[in-house]
């Protein structure tokens, strides 16, 4: 089980099997910095699709020779992501990565049925991995599913379970996060949480251990759980945080990342191929980590 991004980095470097990553809308200095770092470490073999002149200028600023890179000139982000997806579909690349473009435009391309990235009856979701307490925790969904209902939450869990297995967690512990750790009929998320926990115990949600409702503090802090008298296999030791909706997920993760300077990664999951999607404001470090978690999944 990997406990830090450094451990993942070592694992993918040691494999000496660089993956073909295609960066869509590549005229993005921050994204390029992460791509250059991954290239220097032998983790990826990059393809860059975007404004060729600006891309080349950014590469020079990073100390690279643009002639050493596969650059396709396409200034239009919508056309750039189309080229990226076509290359992955046709086996010319292993995974796409979002550069300087709107997340909605990127996701629409990933969801385009002509590329075949989403399995039948599948659902595209997002997973953010961050380091906390000497381990890696996956929070989901922080960027895609706005207000998941009960059945959608099951799909989010299933996607996250498959994803975290690539991080070496065979039977992940899933905490269903709500504002409180008791069922309150006035708080719908607590009802969903209790239903998900029961469904897991009855074998309807497999490959993981689910418990909830759990507030964030007692999901990640054993001391908090003990103080509140919570007895649970998951409390204080959660591998996956299932967040109630996009609002809470986005707010929590941005607070963790920007106020606490926590390192993280972001990937689209539920797809047949790894997909790197980060916020345009993410740091080069976090974009690099997102490449790492995509490659380890591959």
Image (cartoon, rainbow, N blue to C red):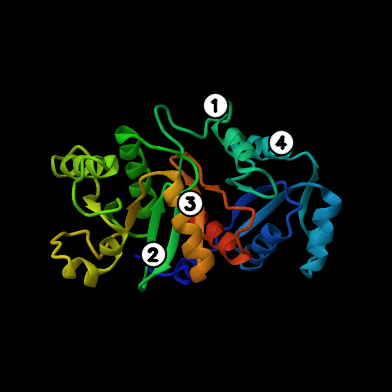
Q: CA distance from mark 2 to mark 1?
A: 33 Å
Q: Earlier in the sequence, mark 4 or mark 3?
A: 4
- Camera-nearest label, 1 or 3: 3
User: Where's residue 41, x and y in %?
Assistant: 61, 68
Find the residue positioned furthest to the right: 53
- Residue indicated by mark 2: 136
Count of residue discs: 4
Distance between mark 2 and mark 3 Cα atoms: 18 Å
How crowded pointer 2 is (Cα within 10 Å; few <14, some 14-19, many 20+) is rated as many
Kindly indicate whether the residue at mark 3 contacts the one at mark 1 (C-beta within 8 angstroms). no
N-term-proximal mark, 1 vs 3: 1
Helix, strand or loop at label 3? It is helix
Which residue appears at 35% of the width and 60% of the height?
A: 168
Badge 4 is on which residue? 78
Tell me if 96 is positioned left or right of 273 in this view: right
Q: CA distance from mark 4 to mark 2?
A: 34 Å
**Alpha carbon of mark 4 to alpha carbon of mark 3: how far?**
25 Å
Q: Is residue 69 above or below residue 203?
A: below
Label 1: element kind: loop
The one nearer the camera, 281 or 97, is 281
| Residue at 56%, 63% in the rendered image | 286
**Quarter of the image where one finds residue 77:** top right
Give left or right: position of 93 versus 246.
right
Which callout, 2 or 3, points to the residue nearer the camera? Answer: 3
Marks 1 and 4, how far apart at CA: 16 Å
Residue that numbered label 1 is attached to = 113
Task: Report x, y in % for residue 218.
Answer: 25, 63
Q: Are marks 1 and 4 in contact (CB under 8 Å)?
A: no
Q: Classify 10 Å Cα crowding around label 3: few (below 14), some (14-19), many (20 and above).
A: some
State which tag comes first along the sequence, 2 or 3. Answer: 2
């Amino acid at each position: 089980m990997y406990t830090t991004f450094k451990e993942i980095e070592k694992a993918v470097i040691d494999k000496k099997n660089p993956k073909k990553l295609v960066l869509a809308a590549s005229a993005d200095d921050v994204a390029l910095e992460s791509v250059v770092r991954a290239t220097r470490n032998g983790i990826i073999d990059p393809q860059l699709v975007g404004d060729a002149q600006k891309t080349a200028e950014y590469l020079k600023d990073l100390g690279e020779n643009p002639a050493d890179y596969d650059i396709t000139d396409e200034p239009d982000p919508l056309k750039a992501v189309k080229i990226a997806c076509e290359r992955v579909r046709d086996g010319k690349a292993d995974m796409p990565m979002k550069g300087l473009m709107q997340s909605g435009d990127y996701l629409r391309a990933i969801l385009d049925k002509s590329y075949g990235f989403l399995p039948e009856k599948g659902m595209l979701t997002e997973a953010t991995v961050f380091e906390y307490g000497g381990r890696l925790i996956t929070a989901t969904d922080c960027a895609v599913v706005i207000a998941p209902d009960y059945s959608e939450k099951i799909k989010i869990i299933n996607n996250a379970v498959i994803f975290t297995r690539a991080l070496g967690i065979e039977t992940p512990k899933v905490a269903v996060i709500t504002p409180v750790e008791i069922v309150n009929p006035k708080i719908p998320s607590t009802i969903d949480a209790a239903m998900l926990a029961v469904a897991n115990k009855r074998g309807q949600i497999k490959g993981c251990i689910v418990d909830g409702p759990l507030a964030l503090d007692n999901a990640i802090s054993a001391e908090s759980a003990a103080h509140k008298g919570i007895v649970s296999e998951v409390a204080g030791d959660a591998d996956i945080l299932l967040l109630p909706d996009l609002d809470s997920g986005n707010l929590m993760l941005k607070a963790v990342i920007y106020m606490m300077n926590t390192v993280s990664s972001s990937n689209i999951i539920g797809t047949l191929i790894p997909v790197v999607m980060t916020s345009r404001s993410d740091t080069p470090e976090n974009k690099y980590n997102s490449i790492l978690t995509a490659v380890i999944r591959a």
